[in-house]
Image (cartoon, grey):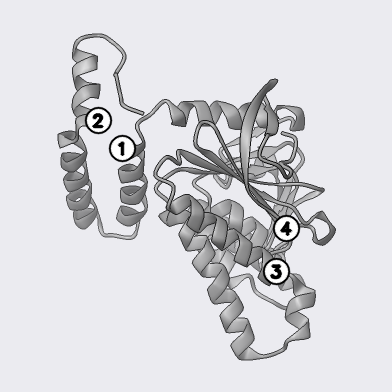
Amino acid sequence: MSAPGSGQDLWITISGMKTPHDTLFDGELRHTRDARGVHWLILNSPATFNALGESMLRQLQQAIDRVATDDAARAVVLGAVGKAFCAGHNLKEMKARPELAYYQQLFAQCTRMMLALRKLPVPVIARVQGIATAAGCQLVAQCDLAVAAEGVRFGVNGIDVGLFCATPSVPLSRNMQPKQAMEMLVTGGFIDAAEAQRRALVNRVVAAEQLDAEVDGLLQAILSKPRLALAMGKQLFYQQAEMGIEAAYQLAGQTMACNMIDEVAQEGVQAFIEKRSPAWRA
């Protein structure tokens, strides 16, 4: 993927084909939207290793809010330019303001952004081309899906400077087994992309030159499915995970019933019976 730039006639090369993009914002975060309804959020501050400073967090939140109001949105790809995917919080900014109230506000701002990704009604794919550390690793873990390039490393290494990665531990412990997550958190040790896949932090690992093709393959699979069913499914998936099994089944059953009564599922089932492709409305 060539990184999005400015201008309304932007084209991005994906898997050998050019896809038109409209630029919605161009700053530390580049936000574009392609003709398929895919929003591309590209961290664009390689000089800071795409750290989640105040400005980057604010721009990410604004972009996510824009996606949330786009009824034609179908997916989000969260990527980056430069050697790093994201190096976590901007420690220089944090050190300049050693105030409890400031730190509380900063981490609350980051938490709001992370939860906003989860609340989006469309799948969010992390396209990880470089190292992801601390809150950067948290960002990968918070996305619904993740594709990483071979050789990429992941770590929650705040403990190396005396800061336990508490907020990154939340999605990390919901992706991998507790002892695996705890080992990373208390040692600051890194894992490579292959190990990240074994631990379920990422879905797929491919050679760097195949990263865009793999992301596009996921996108094509998602775009072939009805938006409403995916939105209902994503919401249910995360809600039931926080419940006891009986409450989870109750919510899942209600969700399936509501899904089934909708014209999307009615058409899909009828098409299956008639051995044809569903004629879903765009």
Amino acid type, callout 3: Gly
Answer whether labels 4 and 1 touch (C-beta < 8 Å).
Answer: no
Answer whether labels 4 and 3 touch (C-beta < 8 Å).
Answer: no
x, y percentage for residue 109?
55, 72
The crowd level at tag 3 (other Cα within 10 Å; few <14, some 14-19, many 20+) is some
Q: Earlier in the sequence, mark 1 or mark 3?
A: 3
Query: Which of 183/267 is in front?
Result: 267
Secondary element type, mark 3: loop
Q: Which residue is mark 3?
A: 53
Residue 264 - label: 2
| 129 left or right, relative to 77 | right
Nearer to us of marks 4 and 3 is 4
Residue 229 - label: 1
Q: Which residue is mark 4?
A: 28
Q: Report how far apart the C-alphas of labels 1 and 2 lie in the structure.
A: 8 Å
Q: Earlier in the sequence, mark 4 or mark 1?
A: 4
Q: Report how far apart the C-alphas of labels 2 and 4 lie in the structure.
A: 39 Å
Amino acid type, callout 4: Glu
Q: Earlier in the sequence, mark 4 or mark 3?
A: 4
Secondary element type, mark 2: helix
Q: Report how far apart the C-alphas of labels 4 and 1 lie in the structure.
A: 33 Å
Amino acid type, callout 2: Val
